[in-house]
Image (cartoon, helix red, strand yellow):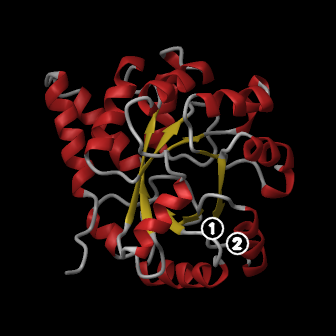
């Protein structure tokens, strides 16, 4: 499996936008996770984030909070997540990242978690509540197990800190579009692009992707002037929730997920 950084840099060299898609493990049911990952893969995602459900997801808005609550009710644990990751990566070369919070990883054991994530074919980790200043143990252990680390910047991140985050990141830098939670409405696009231009000036070692609040190809296209790609999560979770309440059969639901994800990629210029 190519690394996430290699994948994004290959796309950038070819003048192509990279698209990452988030889905929560165990939502709507544990049995749906791998088929959903496969549908997202078929739709052309360049990488996928598999959410590790947590009871207090501080960075998440309503849709992903809801999906985490349902997943936890379904009995999802880190072992469930790692099992789903392993089953997906056995049949796909698309990089899979695990996205979640530090407390479950700490309870599982950092060394155990990184070892098992590597064994499951995971490409990297996103842990939004772990400040890079306090992440030495996880960063070192992840590196020893071939796992890339993705760090986040936000509109209120200073230039100096962005530069530090760029140095520490080993996958890509995730630019949060707004100072808020996932699913937030995008504020003034011109203001967001001013921030992304500033981030691009500081992030020189790694690809820069933007997420939070992107619901359509048009949303993504408006934020790509200074970034290498985009990430969608809450909009897909909302779509999945609607589809699973519709009464349609499983194949039609998954076909609709594939179609929706495919519709998110902006048309590349001729």
Q: Which mark is residue 231?
A: none
Mark 2 secondary-structure assignment: loop
In the displayed structure, 193 sits above or below 81; it is below
Residue farthest toward the top in the current orientation of the protein: 75
Q: Tell me which residue sits at (17%, 36%) in the image.
A: 255
The residue pinned by badge 1 equals 154
State the image coordinates of residue 238 (x, y, percent, origin top left).
Answer: 33, 41
State the image coordinates of residue 45 (x, y, percent, origin top left).
Answer: 35, 51
Position of 222 compared to 1: left or right?
left
Q: In the picture, residue 81 is in which quadrant?
A: top right
Distance of label 1 from label 2 (alpha carbons): 5 Å
In the displayed structure, 201 sits above or below 154; it is below
State the image coordinates of residue 219 (x, y, percent, origin top left).
Answer: 33, 68
In the displayed structure, 159 sits above or below 22; it is below
In the displayed structure, 257 sits above or below 111; it is below
Position of 178 compared to 162: left or right?
left
Mark 1 secondary-structure assignment: loop
Residue farthest toward the front in the current orientation of the protein: 1
Q: Tell me which residue sits at (67%, 72%) in the image.
A: 156
Position of 71 compared to 37: left or right?
right
State the image coordinates of residue 21 (x, y, percent, origin top left).
Answer: 40, 49
Q: Quadrant of the C terminus?
A: bottom left
Q: Residues within 10 Å of mark 1 (few under 14, many from 20)?
A: some
Q: Which mark is residue 157?
A: 2
Q: Residues within 10 Å of mark 2 (few under 14, many from 20)?
A: some
Q: In the picture, residue 38 is in which quadrant?
A: top left
Q: Nearer the viewer, residue 205 or 201?
A: 205
Q: Are marks 1 and 2 in contact (CB under 8 Å)?
A: yes
For residue 177, say whether it is visible.
Answer: no
Q: Nearer the viewer, residue 27 or 46?
A: 46
For residue 76, say whether it is visible.
Answer: yes
């Amino acid at each position: 499996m190519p690394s996430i950084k290699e994948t994004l840099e290959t796309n950038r060299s070819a003048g192509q936008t990279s698209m990452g898609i988030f889905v929560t493990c165990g939502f709507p049911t544990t049995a749906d996770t791998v088929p959903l990952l496969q549908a997202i893969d078929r739709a052309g995602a360049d990488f996928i984030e598999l959410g590790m459900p947590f009871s207090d997801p501080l960075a998440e808005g309503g849709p992903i909070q809801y999906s985490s609550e349902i997943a936890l009710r379904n009995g999802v644990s880190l072992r469930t997540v790692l099992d789903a990751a392993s089953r997906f990566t056995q049949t796909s070369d698309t990089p899979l990242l695990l996205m979640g919070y530090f407390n479950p990883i700490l309870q599982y054991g950092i060394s155990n978690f990184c070892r098992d994530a590597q064994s499951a074919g995971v490409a990297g980790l996103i842990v939004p509540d772990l400040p890079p200043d306090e992440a030495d143990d996880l960063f070192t252990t992840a590196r020893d197990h071939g796992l890339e680390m993705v760090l986040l910047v936000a509109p209120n991140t200073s230039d100096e800190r962005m530069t530090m985050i760029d140095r520490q990141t080993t996958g890509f830098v995730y630019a949060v579009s707004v100072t808020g939670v996932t699913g937030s409405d995008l504020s003034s696009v011109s203001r967001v692009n001013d921030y992304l231009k500033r981030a691009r000036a500081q992030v020189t070692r790694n690809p820069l992707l933007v997420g939070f609040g992107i619901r359509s190809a048009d949303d993504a296209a408006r934020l790509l002037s200074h970034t290498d790609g985009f990430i969608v999560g809450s909009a897909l979770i909302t779509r999945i929730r609607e589809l699973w309440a519709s009464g349609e059969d499983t194949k039609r639901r998954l076909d609709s997920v594939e179609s929706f994800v495919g519709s998110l990629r902006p048309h590349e210029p001729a």
